[in-house]
């Protein structure tokens, strides 16, 4: 029963890398641009969960020292959360930009299928 | 002066977001802002170099917000970073001068993105914090994506989409690598990670290394992750392409090796793998350039090849090789930038589509531009006594001293291939048997002036020996700055 315990202990990591794998699958296999973008977003979310779970310790709280109950030994690491906030904002910007490029591409080619949008050779 | 070194990043950032406001007052003003900003940065960067020389090369550490390094973010400006800063701001200034009348109906947002791109690159080469590096990488990428799509025709939109897809994957890999490093060392400061990296288990270290290697290799145009490069270079506006090829790639190569050398203290086996990547990149880039019909595509493949050469040189880890690689970086940034701008000027004045065959015999009408193109090409291939020759000489002797004879042979083979397509191009533009008919004089002086100024400066520079000796001294200090981990750590954290 050892491996079940391991998976349980690292369940956030397993979930995060599961999301990243699903996203990679979508990016590599799908031909619809919107689906590829959703895949990229899934990867982003997976990485963000991975980052947050790095700092998480079971049963400990946020490092806000206004309440007297919390002492330094009893808090989680706040830095990954600050990193995730930045990463989310960057992900938002990239998503917005690529959506607008996709809209323009659709207006130009009347299709979202990347196997049909081929003016350039690889 | 040095205490305010953050201005080299902060001023462009401020100027970038000031541009839309300035455009509301007067539509003609925004195009002068990039010039002003880059001129300021050039003066500032040269001052930083003088300061470094005056203080015996002690790296400039800027503590942001007054927090001491392992806890706060710091900037690290050593010799190599200063060389790249000068390169970024001078080449940026040249391209900004060129842009004024070339980009058709350029709006304020074009200049805003242009300044943001240069600011992101400036941040990349100065930062001393891994997550900050990721943020600057993303600023650079997002500005680059939108500039690629600037023309909004089918070609540029498609290239931009391709770039976005590959770039997002790159940033994800980089972020995973940084997260794993943070988890195992509990710090984001590069010097602090370097101090603690030996206590990290090998498996974890190799995982983080491979993630960062893949992510940064995509940005640095290394094989096999460079399928986006020719398309982006063909589709983007030419001044932007010149920035990509001369500046952005150089900064990402710096980051690539800063991570490999300083953060991971990579050993010979990793370096041999990187040399292998570089060799494949070099050969494939140069051979693909042979059969290109489009000028920008040809120059794009040639840029890929040059990146391969620089990466091989720096990965050789010998002092001479690293110095030669840095020399080649400077050389390539200047001459490839000139080449992109001058050929684009030729193409616009015959209103061509960018095919090489359209330029047949153009030298009869545009002797100055043709001479500049031919000179840059000869300097890039490495004909003695021009700069390219000395750079390649240093690289090759560095590689010989570390016992990479086969790599030397392959580099020489690639140089021959490079000479074939470049000399063929010179033969086409100097072909006197054809008369150029559809030439219309669109001589705008400020288009060609920066190119001429730069060419003259470089010719003077490569012919005066005193300059070269001084410069070589700086090159070796820069090489030492990149490879010496101990001095990096003690400069940031104190001994």
Image (cartoon, rainbow, N blue to C red):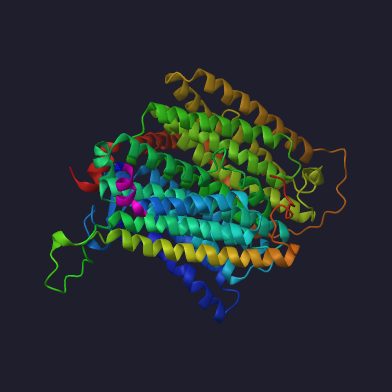
Task: Establish if B78 lies above or below B261.
Answer: below
- Give how far across and how far down residue B298 sits, in percent: 69, 41
Q: Is residue B35 visible?
A: no
**Does residue A108 appear to the left or right of B474 in the view shown?**
right
Q: Quadrant of residue B113?
A: bottom right
Highlighted magenta segment, given as a residue range: A3-12
Which residue reaches farthest bottom?
A: B25
Asked if residue A11 lies in the magenta stretch, the reply is: yes
Q: In which quarter of the image is residue B55?
A: top left
- Give how far across and how far down residue B414 sits, in percent: 62, 28
Q: Quadrant of residue B223?
A: top right
Q: Can residue A53 be seen in this view?
A: yes
Q: Residue at x 29, y 47 (%)?
A: A5
Task: Establish if B78 lies above or below B165.
Answer: above
Task: Establish if B441 lies above or below B177.
Answer: below
Quadrant of the rendering where the C terminus of chain B is positioned: top left
Q: B286 and B195: which one is in front?
A: B195
Asked if residue A25 lies in the magenta stretch, the reply is: no
């Amino acid at each position: 029963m050892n491996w079940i315990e391991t998976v349980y202990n690292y369940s956030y990591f397993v979930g995060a890398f599961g999301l990243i794998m699903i996203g990679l699958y979508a990016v590599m296999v799908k031909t619809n641009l919107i689906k590829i973008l959703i895949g990229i977003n899934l990867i982003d979310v997976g990485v963000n969960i991975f980052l947050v779970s790095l700092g998480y310790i079971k049963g400990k709280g946020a490092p806000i020292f206004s309440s007297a109950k919390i002492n330094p030994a009893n808090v989680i690491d706040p830095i990954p959360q600050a990193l995730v906030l930045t990463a989310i904002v960057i992900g938002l910007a990239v998503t917005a930009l690529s959506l607008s490029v996709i809209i323009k591409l659709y207006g130009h080619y009347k299709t979202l299928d990347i196997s049909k949008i081929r003016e350039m050779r690889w | 002066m040095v205490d305010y070194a953050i201005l080299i990043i902060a001023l462009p950032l401020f100027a970038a977001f000031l541009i839309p406001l300035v455009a509301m007052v007067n539509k003609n003003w925004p195009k002068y802002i990039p010039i002003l900003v880059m001129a300021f940065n050039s003066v500032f960067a040269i001052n930083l170099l003088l300061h470094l020389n005056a203080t015996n090369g002690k790296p400039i550490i800027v503590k942001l917000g007054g927090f001491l390094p392992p806890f706060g973010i710091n900037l690290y400006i050593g010799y190599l970073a200063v060389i790249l800063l000068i390169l970024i701001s001078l080449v940026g200034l040249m391209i900004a001068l060129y842009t004024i009348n070339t980009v058709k109906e350029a709006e304020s947002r074009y200049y805003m993105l242009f300044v943001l791109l240069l600011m992101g690159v400036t941040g990349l080469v100065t930062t001393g914090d891994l997550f900050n590096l990721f943020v600057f990488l993303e600023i650079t990428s997002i500005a680059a994506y939108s500039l690629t799509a600037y023309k909004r025709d089918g070609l540029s939109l498609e290239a931009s989409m391709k770039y976005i897809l590959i770039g997002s994957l790159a940033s994800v890999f980089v972020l995973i690598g940084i997260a794993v490093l943070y988890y195992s060392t509990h710090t984001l400061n590069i010097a602090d990670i370097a101090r603690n990296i030996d206590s990290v288990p090998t498996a974890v270290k190799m995982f983080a290394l491979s993630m960062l290697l893949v992510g940064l290799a995509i940005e640095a145009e290394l094989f096999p992750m460079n399928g986006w490069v020719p398309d982006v270079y063909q589709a983007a506006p030419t001044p932007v392409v010149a920035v990509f090829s001369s500046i952005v790639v150089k900064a990402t190569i710096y980051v690539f090796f800063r991570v490999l050398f300083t953060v991971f203290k990579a050993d010979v086996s990793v370096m041999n793998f990187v040399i292998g990547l570089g060799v494949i990149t070099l050969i494939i880039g140069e051979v693909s350039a042979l059969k290109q019909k489009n000028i920008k595509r040809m120059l794009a493949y040639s840029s890929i090849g040059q990146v391969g050469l620089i990466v091989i040189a720096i990965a050789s880890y010998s002092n001479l090789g690293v110095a030669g690689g840095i020399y080649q970086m400077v050389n390539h940034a200047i001459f490839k930038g000139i080449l992109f701008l001058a050929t684009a000027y030729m193409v616009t004045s015959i209103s061509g589509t960018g095919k090489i065959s359209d330029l047949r015999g153009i030298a009869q009408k545009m002797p100055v531009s043709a001479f500049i193109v031919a000179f840059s090409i000869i300097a890039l291939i490495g004909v003695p006594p021009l700069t390219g020759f000395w750079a390649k000489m240093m690289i090759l002797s560095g590689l010989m001293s570390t016992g990479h004879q086969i790599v030397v042979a392959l580099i020489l083979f690639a140089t021959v291939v490079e000479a074939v397509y470049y000399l063929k191009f010179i033969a086409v533009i100097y072909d006197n048997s054809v008369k150029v008919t559809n030439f219309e004089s669109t001589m705008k002086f400020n288009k060609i002036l920066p190119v001429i100024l730069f060419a003259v400066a470089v010719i003077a520079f490569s012919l005066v020996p005193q300059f070269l000796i001084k410069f070589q001294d700086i090159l070796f200090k820069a090489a030492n700055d990149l490879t010496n981990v101990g001095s990096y750590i003690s400069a940031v954290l104190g001994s």
